[in-house]
Image (cartoon, rainbow, N blue to C red):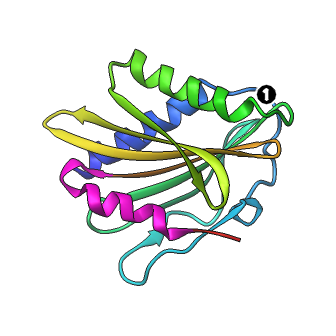
C-alpha cells in the first residue's frame, strides 16, 4: 500500500504541476504559510526539512507521514498577481484535471483558517487499492495553497481529522 500511496502523492503533485504559471517560489517555506501545521505526538513525522522546489512557481512546502499510511502534503504555487478570481480558477483547473482523468470529485465552498477555500474530495483506485483524498485549495495574496490529506479509503474519518492539524496563525 505504501508504494500506491507514494504513487498517488506523485500523481497529485503532477496534477498541480499542470496548472503552473512561471513565477518564482524561491525561498518559500511553511513559515510563510497563512496557517500552522502541527503534527500530533506519536508516529507522525515530516519527510525532509527543506521545501522541494518543483518548478519556478511551485514548491512542495511540507510532506508528513505516519506509520499507518496516512499523509499530508502542502504545495505552494506562486501566482501571477492578486485577483479575486484566483481561487475559482485554481478550483476549476484542479477539478478539470481530476475529472479528465475520470475521477469523481465533490467540491464544497468552505473556509479554512479564516480564508475562503474549496474542499475537493475524491477517490483514486491504484491496483487493488483505493485511496481517499481531501484537498483544500485557498489563495492568500499572490500565493495558491494546496493542502491534501491522503490515505486508504476505509480510513475517511482519519483523513478528515488530518485537516485539523492545520490552524490559523
Queried whether the magenta region covers residue 158, the answer comes back as yes
Residue at the image point whose x is 79% and y is 27% from the top: 22
Q: Please tell me whether residue 43 is drawn above or below residue 117 in the rendered image.
A: below
15 or 48: which is nearer to us? 15
Queried whether the magenta region covers residue 59, the answer comes back as no
Q: Please tell me whether residue 166 is drawn above or below residue 148 in the rendered image.
A: below
- Badge 1 crowding class, 10 Å Cα cut-off, few under 14, some 14 to 19, many 20 or more, is few
Does residue 60 appear left or right of residue 95 in this picture? right
Residue lying farthest left? 128
Classify the position of the C terminus by image quarter: bottom right
Residue at the image point whose x is 21% and y is 40% from the top: 130
Residue at the image point whose x is 51% and y is 31% from the top: 14
Residue lying farthest bottom? 41
Q: Please tell me whether residue 8 is drawn above or below residue 17 in the rendered image.
A: below
Does residue 86 appear left or right of residue 132 in this picture? right
The segment highlighted magenta reads: 151-166
Assign a secondary structure to mark 1: loop
> Residue 63: x percent and y percent?
51, 58
> Residue 124: x percent and y percent?
29, 34
149 or 56: which is nearer to us? 149
Residue at the image point whose x is 58% and y is 24% from the top: 93
> Residue 13: x percent and y percent?
51, 37
**Which SS does the magenta portion mostly show?**
helix
In terms of image quadrants, where is residue 133? top left
Residue holding disc 1: 22
43 or 52: which is nearer to us? 43
134 or 111: which is nearer to us? 111
Residue lying farthest right? 81
Does residue 31 appear left or right of residue 96 in this picture? right
> Residue 122: x percent and y percent?
34, 37
Amino acid at each position: 500500500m505504501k508504494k500506491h500511496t507514494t504513487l498517488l502523492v506523485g500523481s497529485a503533485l503532477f496534477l498541480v504541476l499542470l496548472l503552473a504559471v512561471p513565477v518564482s517560489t524561491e525561498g518559500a517555506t511553511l513559515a510563510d504559510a497563512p496557517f500552522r501545521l502541527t503534527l500530533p505526538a506519536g508516529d507522525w513525522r515530516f519527510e525532509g526539512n527543506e521545501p522541494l522546489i518543483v518548478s519556478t512557481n511551485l514548491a512542495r512546502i511540507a510532506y508528513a507521514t505516519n506509520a499507518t499510511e496516512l499523509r499530508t502534503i502542502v504545495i505552494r504555487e506562486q501566482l501571477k498577481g492578486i485577483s479575486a478570481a484566483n481561487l475559482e480558477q485554481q478550483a476549476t483547473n484542479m477539478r478539470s484535471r481530476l475529472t479528465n482523468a475520470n475521477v469523481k470529485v465533490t467540491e464544497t465552498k468552505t473556509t479554512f483558517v479564516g480564508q475562503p477555500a474549496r474542499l475537493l474530495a475524491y477517490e483514486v483506485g491504484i491496483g487493488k487499492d483505493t485511496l481517499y483524498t481531501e484537498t483544500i485549495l485557498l489563495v492568500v495574496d499572490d500565493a495558491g495553497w494546496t493542502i491534501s490529506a491522503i490515505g486508504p479509503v476505509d480510513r475517511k474519518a482519519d483523513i478528515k481529522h488530518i485537516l485539523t492539524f492545520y490552524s490559523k496563525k
